[in-house]
Image (tube, rainbow, N blue to C red):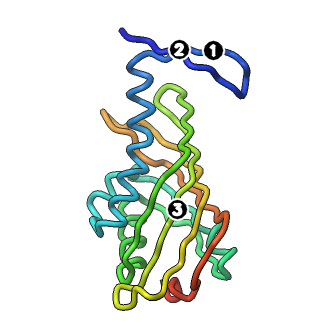
């Protein structure tokens, strides 16, 4: 089995990751990539594949900063359906950066930044760009990792926030 040594700058120690650990880290991040691609491609099945059946998504920390209050959404299929429907009038791009993964057996956490561009399909002269912090708890489900709990908090917003009115 191949191992990779890496410096852990937060602790000042070196750790060794096996190839299976590295593959798990990549697979954890892939769950958030499936989520983002499902949104941007308007592919509800792909979006749903990112979530556990009993998942919870909490967009409240971000939406409260935008003057709206959304309760947490429960159930992977419900989350996918609700988010897909709410973003249906928009063209979007979601780009993940700085993903940090912590593994603990068949559970994982992921922290990352998601830049989210939203444009009305009928008027690309208007947009709102949001940069959000994503805190994600995941579980292994067969060969894949899926989101168990997602919390989204807004770091900053630029553009016309009324683009998101009515979602």
Q: Secondary structure at mark 2?
A: strand
Residue denoted by label 2: 5
Mark 1 neighbour class, 10 Å CA radius: few under 14, some 14 to 19, many 20 or more: few
Q: Residue at x 26, y 60 (%)?
A: 45
Q: Measuring from the top left, give residue 153's x and y in whole percent.
A: 64, 62
Q: Secondary structure at mark 1?
A: strand
Residue furthest to the front in view is 125
Who is closer to the viewer here, 3 or 104?
A: 3
Q: Residue at x 48, y 42 (%)?
A: 138
Determine whether 62 is above or below 146 in the image. Answer: below
Q: Measuring from the top left, give residue 154's x and y in whole percent.
A: 64, 65
Determine whether 106 is above or below 86 in the image. Answer: above
Q: Measuring from the top left, give residue 67's x and y in whole percent.
A: 68, 82
Q: Which mark is residue 115?
A: 3
Residue denoted by label 1: 14
Q: Are marks 2 and 1 in contact (CB under 8 Å)?
A: yes
> Along the polypeptide, which appears first: circle 2 or circle 3?
2
């Amino acid at each position: 089995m191949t191992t990779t040594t890496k410096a852990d700058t937060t602790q000042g120690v070196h750790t060794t990751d096996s190839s299976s650990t590295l593959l798990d880290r990549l697979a954890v991040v892939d769950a958030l990539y499936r989520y983002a691609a499902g949104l941007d491609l308007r592919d509800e099945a792909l979006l749903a594949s990112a979530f556990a059946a009993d998942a919870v998504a909490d967009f409240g920390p971000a939406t409260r900063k935008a003057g709206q209050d959304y309760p947490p959404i429960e159930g992977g299929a419900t989350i996918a359906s609700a988010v897909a429907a709410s973003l249906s009038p928009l063209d979007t791009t979601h780009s993940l950066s700085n993903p940090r993964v912590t593994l603990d057996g068949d559970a994982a956490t992921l922290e990352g930044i998601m830049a989210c561009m939203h444009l009305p399909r009928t008027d690309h002269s208007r947009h709102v760009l949001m940069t959000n912090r994503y805190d994600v708890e995941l579980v292994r489900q067969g060969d894949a990792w899926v989101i168990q709990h997602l919390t989204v908090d807004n770091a900053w917003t630029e553009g016309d926030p009324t683009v998101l009115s009515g979602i």
